[in-house]
Each structure stands twice: as structure tokens, then as C-alpha cells.
Image: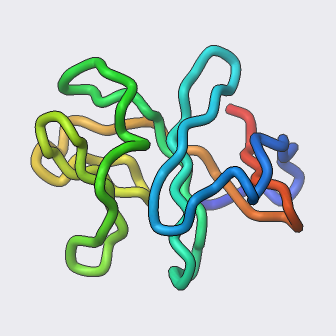
Amino acid sequence: MTINPNADWLKLCNKSDLVPNTGVAALYEDQQIAIFYIPGYEDEVFAIGNQDPFSGANILARGLIGDIKGEPMVASPLYKQHFSLNTGSCFEDSNTQVPVWPVRLKGENVEIIAA
């Protein structure tokens, strides 16, 4: 994902709100965003839509994280589809994906680029 160097970053939450190696949900403009904090990965934080497109439930932040062939992913806790934390694409159905936000840690802030 190429990020515009002039993009406006917005604070979403504090780093202390994150739990290592799991996800948390945050609200941004009536959208639930699943934030995953994975210390040790090149990019330690990932932000995807929290809504599981197969069930419609806002639940992806509660999914199990891991990787498939080196690609960080989350498994939906309902129907177990796997979504890339980098692209939002579903591994089992390439026509399905969830939104992805550029995200970063800046000091003690978790920031996203507003869409």
C-alpha cells in the first residue's frame, strides 16, 4: 500500500488500548475498525474493517491472528474465513475483502489515515 506523504493522520486510540498479539475494536465515523497489534512484525499494527462480510457481525477484532505463508491474517471467529491484515482479501474467496486503513504507531498514539 503506497501512502501519500502529505496524508492527514488521525489519532484513533492510545497504544495502551492495544493488547499484544490480539485485536481490539475502535469506532471511526460510524465504522468499526479492528486494530491488531503484533509486536515483532515489520508493521506492528494493522487496521481492517471489523465486520465479517459472510455473517454481517462486527466480530473480526475477536478473531485468531496468525499467518498463512508469511502473510499476517485473522480468522473470523464465526465461519473461520481468513482475511489478510495487509490487503483485507479473503484467502478462501478472492472476490471478498474487508476495508483496510493505513495505520501507524506514533509515540503513544495509534493513527490512521482517514478515507
Camera-side residue of 86 and 58: 58
On the image, the x and y values in percent for residue 103 come to 67, 54
Which residue is pictured at 38% across the width and 47% down the height? 88
Q: Quadrant of the N terminus?
A: bottom right
Asked whether, in this view, residue 65 is left or right of residue 95, the answer is right
Camera-side residue of 106 and 91: 106
On the image, the x and y values in percent for residue 54 come to 19, 26
Please tell me whether residue 36 is drawn above or below residue 41 in the rendered image: above
Question: In terms of image quadrants, where is residue 8?
Answer: top right
**How many discs mark residues in the rendered view?**
0
Here the colouring is rainbow
Please tell me whether residue 71 is drawn above or below residue 99 in the rendered image: below
Which residue is pictured at 24% across the width and 43% down the height? 76
Which residue is pictured at 17% across the width and 34% down the height? 78
Which residue is pictured at 79% across the width and 51% down the height? 14
Please tell me whether residue 37 is drawn above or below residue 101 in the rendered image: below
On the image, the x and y values in percent for residue 44 come to 59, 71
Asked whether, in this view, residue 69 is left or right of residue 22, the answer is left
On the image, the x and y values in percent for residue 28 come to 68, 26
Q: Quadrant of the C terminus?
A: top right
Camera-side residue of 21 and 94: 21
